[in-house]
Amino acid sequence: MHPRDILLGAQARTGTLPVCDHYSGVEARMRKSLALQAEMTQEFGACVFDVTLDCEDGAPVGGEAEHAALVVELALNAPLGARVAVRVHPVGHPAFESDIATIAGKAGRRLVHIMLPKVESPADVERAAKALDAAGATQLPLQGLIESPAAVHRAFDIAAHPRMQSLSFGLMDFVSAHGGAIPSHGMGVEGQFTHPLVVRAKLEISSACHAHGKVPSHGVVTEFRNQAAFRAAASRAANEFGYTRMWSIHPDQIRPILEVFAPGADEIHKASQLLHAAQAAEWAPISFDGKLEDRASYRYYWQVLERAHGTGRELPVEARGWFPAARP
């Protein structure tokens, strides 16, 4: 059996997702994003980030149907193996039903997920799931965007829905929903990691995802010109807040996310050596570098290798057989 099946089993998540989710909604930028994804797939030997085509912020008012048709065209013409998703309008928006019918109905087979913004309750998720089923996209996962204090309160119930694959945090709307109680600093690259209400919301969403085997995805950091500040924010999201995925809103943010969320070379090497020793022992406990290792640590180090592969890192020779498309 493959190590993934042996070590994760019933604890396996809904799927291993790329650590970066890149958003674009203007036609020229959507086309450039898909071209960049194809270029970096060739470079890394794996598709290392998702491209989410945005209807909610990308469609002009009154032009929702035309924008949905454009998104369908782009998804259907994306290269084989591309990872393309779509953010539709919220369930309460007049364009929601037509978004799902058009996009999922015509291009569902080419999409990796539908992002549902402004999720307030499990009922919103269920409504979206039924709409996808009605459009014939019965296997298409949902991802949700948590953007209000009430949605944070229900994050565990939302994450528990079987169709939900990942939750993201909508920082700007969350801060705005507090009627000025959170200062604008709470939306900034530093304040969003220090203001108690924002910190609490991020931790609730991350914890809800981990509790239900879903992927916590850190949302927008708008300071894309300041690479040092952005890299520091990505590092805090990954290493302090438990997020395993992050949004990009500018091409310059993609590589820093890949680098920050990737394990280091030493950890990759240790994971490969340890797991081969464990496999030779048929996954029984072993002594490795003077320490006892067992299934719990094997699971951790297997996930290190999955992240390494998903971020295009070079894998040791002995680990490449577990990832047939691994970078040579």
Image (spheres, helix red, strand yellow):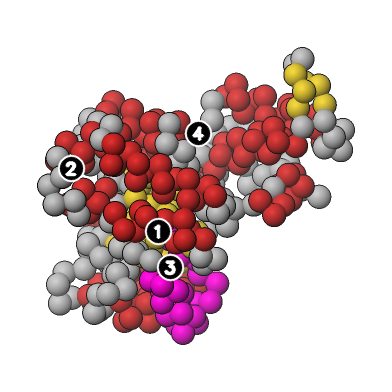
Question: What is the C-alpha distance between the residues marked 3 and 1?
Answer: 8 Å
Q: Nearer the viewer, residue 293 or 33?
A: 293
Q: Mark 1 = which residue?
A: 154
Which residue has dot 2 on it? Answer: 182
Q: Residue furthest top?
A: 290
Residue drawn 38% across the image and 66% down it: 121
- Number of the front mark, 2 or 4: 2
Dot 4 falls on a residue whose secondary structure is loop
Label 4 or label 3, whichever comes before in sequence order: 3
Disc 4 marks a residue whose amino acid type is Ala
How far across and down, in percent of the image, does residue 296 sit?
70, 36
Which amino acid type corresponds to the residue marked 2 in the rendered image?
Ile
- Position in image of residue 158 (x %, y %): 44, 61
Q: Could you classify mark 2 by the number of other residues whose Cα lies within 10 Å: few (under 14), some (14-19), or many (20 or more)? A: some
Q: Mark 2 vs mark 4: which is more N-terminal?
A: 2
Whichever of callouts 3 and 1 sits on the residue coming sooner in the sequence is 3
Q: Give whichever of discs 2 and 1 has the lower sequence position.
A: 1
Q: Which of the labelled discs sits on residue 122, or is there none?
A: 3
